[in-house]
Image: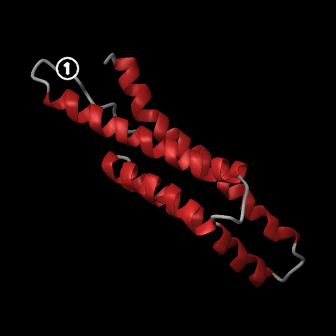
Amino acid sequence: MRPFRQRLLYWTPRILTIAFAIFISLFALDVFRAGKGFWEVTLALLIHLLPTAVILGVLSLAWQREWLGAISYVAMAILYIVRTWGRFNLGTYLIIAGPLLLIGILFTLNWFLRKKFEMSPKSNYKQPPSA
């Protein structure tokens, strides 16, 4: 694989995860129109931002260990579908679980291809530098 493709495969799941975390965080903004007190709004905001914290926490673990991201993001997508089955329409599942599944697949590809190129005797594969 060419260096550009290696870098693209390395950075794409990480950037998509950050973008998805920002998207999920937008749903927490509905707590401000509730007309409640400061502490109630603060508590509601923290509760609404828990999924974002989990997503970013898994990203911090998966940054160097792609297999953790591969397993965790696919598991989160499946868990979301199982826990909310029948409550939403297909579009909602695709908007929430779809990106998680895609990110998990990209981390899986990154993990397998990195192992393949590292094991190859003629490989000049170098992991992209971490930020």
Q: How many marks?
A: 1
Asked whether 11 or 67 is in front, the reply is 67
Residue 101: percent from left, percent from top: 50, 47
Residue 15: percent from left, percent from top: 52, 39
Asked whether 93 or 96 is in front, the reply is 93
- Residue 66 shows in this picture: yes
Residue depicted at 14% across the width and 25% down the height: 120
Residue 97: percent from left, percent from top: 58, 52
Scheme of colours in the image: secondary structure
Q: Quadrant of the N terminus?
A: top left
Q: Residues within 10 Å of mark 1 (few under 14, many from 20)?
A: few
Residue depicted at 58% across the width and 64% down the height: 51
- Residue 64 shows in this picture: no
Q: Which residue is mark 1?
A: 124
Looking at the picture, does residue 2 appear above or below residue 49?
A: above
Looking at the picture, does residue 17 appear above or below residue 39?
A: above
Residue depicted at 28% across the width and 36% down the height: 112
Locate residue 27: give its quadrant.
bottom right
Q: Amino acid at mark 1?
A: Asn
Residue depicted at 34% across the width and 19% down the height: 3
Tell me: 45 left or right of 69: right
Q: What is the residue that sits farthest to the front in this orientation?
A: 86
Residue 104: percent from left, percent from top: 44, 46
Tell me: 104 left or right of 3: right
Tell me: 9 left or right of 52: left
